[in-house]
Amino acid sequence: MTIRVRPHHLLCLLTYSGKGYSPAFIANYDAIAARLSKGEDIVIVCGPDDICAPLLSDSEPHCWSASVTERD
């Protein structure tokens, strides 16, 4: 299966430490990082990706905000 990743998350992966986020976000991010470490394919996407998934049910997910889109 291919992992969908937005551009700025490629940089976030370099410094991710699993702190300062919600438990659901950390669990998802850890699972995705493990899949990437095993060499799973990625596709670069515009907008929310597989890392954002746990946040998309929030009433106003920051994944759609202009500041996040600008980082991409």
Image (cartoon, rainbow, N blue to C red):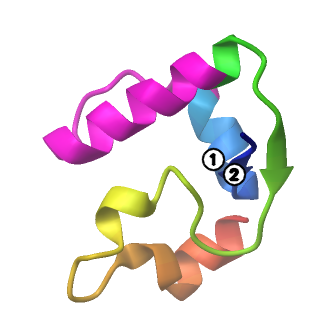
Residue shown at 75% from the left, 43% from the top: 2
Q: Tell which of 72 and 3 is nearer to you.
A: 3
Q: Position of residue 29 (x, y in %)?
A: 42, 35
Please tell me whether residue 34 belongs to the stretch shown in magenta.
yes
Residue shown at 26% from the left, 76% from the top: 57
SS class, disc 1: helix
Please tell me whether residue 48 belongs to the stretch shown in magenta.
no
Image check: 14 left or right of 17? right
Q: Position of residue 65 (x, y in %)?
A: 49, 84
Mark 1 Cα shell of 10 Å, populated few (<14), some (14-19), many (≥20): some
Disc 1 from disc 2: Cα separation: 6 Å
Give the residue type that dot 2 points to: Val
Q: Quadrant of residue 38?
A: top right
CB of mark 1 within 8 Å of CB of mark 2? yes
Q: Tell which of 6 and 16 is nearer to you.
A: 6
Give the residue type that dot 1 points to: His
Image check: 70 left or right of 50? right
Mark 2 Cα shell of 10 Å, populated few (<14), some (14-19), many (≥20): many
Q: Residue furthest left?
A: 23
- The mark found on residue 67 in the picture is none
Relative vertical location of residue 15 with respect to residue 64 in this rendering, above or below? above
The image quadrant where one finds the N terminus is top right
Q: Position of residue 72 (x, y in %)?
A: 73, 65
Dot 1 corresponds to which residue? 9
Q: Position of residue 44 (x, y in %)?
A: 82, 56
Q: Nearer the viewer, mark 1 or mark 2?
A: 2
Residue shown at 55% from the left, 24% from the top: 33
* Most common secondary structure along the magenta stretch: helix
SS class, disc 2: strand
Stretch in magenta: 14-35
Image check: 50 left or right of 21? right
- The mark found on residue 5 in the picture is 2
